[in-house]
Image (spheres, rainbow, N blue to C red):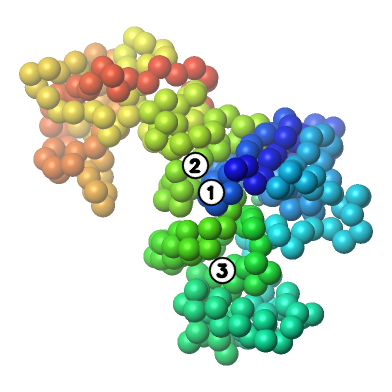
Amino acid sequence: MTLLSIKHISKQYDKDNHALTNFSLNIKKGSVWSLVGESGSGKSTLLRIVAGLEVQDKGEVYFNGEKILNPTQKLVPGYQEIQLIHQDHHLFPHSTVAENIMRPLLLFDKDYKKERLEYLLDLLDLESHRHKLPRELSGGQQQKVAIGRALSLEPEILLLDEPFSSLDTIQKRILIGELKTIFRKLKVTVLLVTHDIDDAMTMTDQLCIIRKGRIIQKGQSKKIHQNPKNYYVAKLLSELNPLPDRSDSYIRPSEVIFDATAHALSGKVREVQYLVAHNQLKVLVNSSSLEWTVEDRKRKFKKGDRIDLSWDQEKVLYLTGIPMPLTL
Ligand code: ADP
Ligand code: MG
């Protein structure tokens, strides 16, 4: 069942700046979507429009079949059922964790407040921090308090704007793991915005790739990876090695195999970089001026080694679009 239906949304802040153009996305109840795009691609604008906090030029958003009213149409902008959590989560610095979480419940019944607080502290594993101030918490814990505060109102939709951008790698990994469990447990519907494709894919397999306010591709991450719509999407997911004499054909580093019998190209290792899962090699391809990036998972090759490069023909990506560097 579609819970959130975003239909043909366009938004222009000024003459030359199209923040969003004809953006449409249907989100099923209980699903988690990641919206991925470079900075300035319109992600935050979209979340604000979905939350009823920004006026769009064209299009509508429907929640449970009801039209979301924007600030010109509604006296008090926003909806209790749709909670937006900002990147810099705006916690009250002089209020404790418990006070921050309960803040939106000011006018609620005392027993309900208490019950809801205990439930959320337990859910978010924040019981032992309940009396602490935000500055006494890690970045990941602060983000959880902000999520707890949004969840206090029992929303049906959570909109998360770059929730991991201020966290270090370890905190981020922990938080993503915890959030996945929490969202599954609550069956809440989530639209998460990030500029980081790895974070997006760790969080969920439903991706929507946005560029300059337009959707480039949406759907399951596996399908997008196997069948990227164009060069831009493919490059967002990994490095791409161009095949010699073919302007539209590429092979991903992870698909290159070092097979002497069936080799299609040979080259010389120019650089070896030790990475966590493999050594990343830069290889000068003999027959051309191309440099390829390949993954040496057995950490076998050294700088200067000759190397045979081959690949499965089925793994070749045929891509349209201009090869341009990404500026995430
Ligand atoms: P993202 O969240 O993907 O970085 P934003 O939605 O914040 O993108 O911004 C999209 C575009 O709209 C950018 O070019 C940005 O400069 C512009 N923009 C965003 N908010 C405003 C605003 N309040 N006034 C004018 N321009 C804005
Ligand atoms: Mg933003």
Tell me the element at label 3: helix
**Image coords of residue 237 (percent x, y):** 42, 36
Q: Is residue 156 visible?
A: yes
Q: Amino acid at mark 2?
A: Gln
| Mark 2 nearby-residue class (10 Å; few <14, some 14–19, many ≥20) | many
| Residue 325 x %, y % | 50, 32
Q: Amino acid at mark 1?
A: Ser
* Crowding at mark 1 (Cα within 10 Å: few <14, some 14-19, many 20+): some
**Which mark is drawn over residue 206?**
2
Q: Position of residue 20 (x, y in %)?
A: 72, 36
Which label lies toward us, 1 or 3?
A: 1
Question: Badge 1 is on which residue?
Answer: 31
Instruction: Write down the residue under mark 3.
Output: 143
Along the line of sight, which residue is nearer the eye, 147 or 242? 147
Image point (80%, 54%), residue name: 53
What secondary structure is marked by label 1? loop
Circle 3/circle 2 CB separation < 8 Å: no
Q: Is mark 1 within 8 Å of ligand 1?
A: no
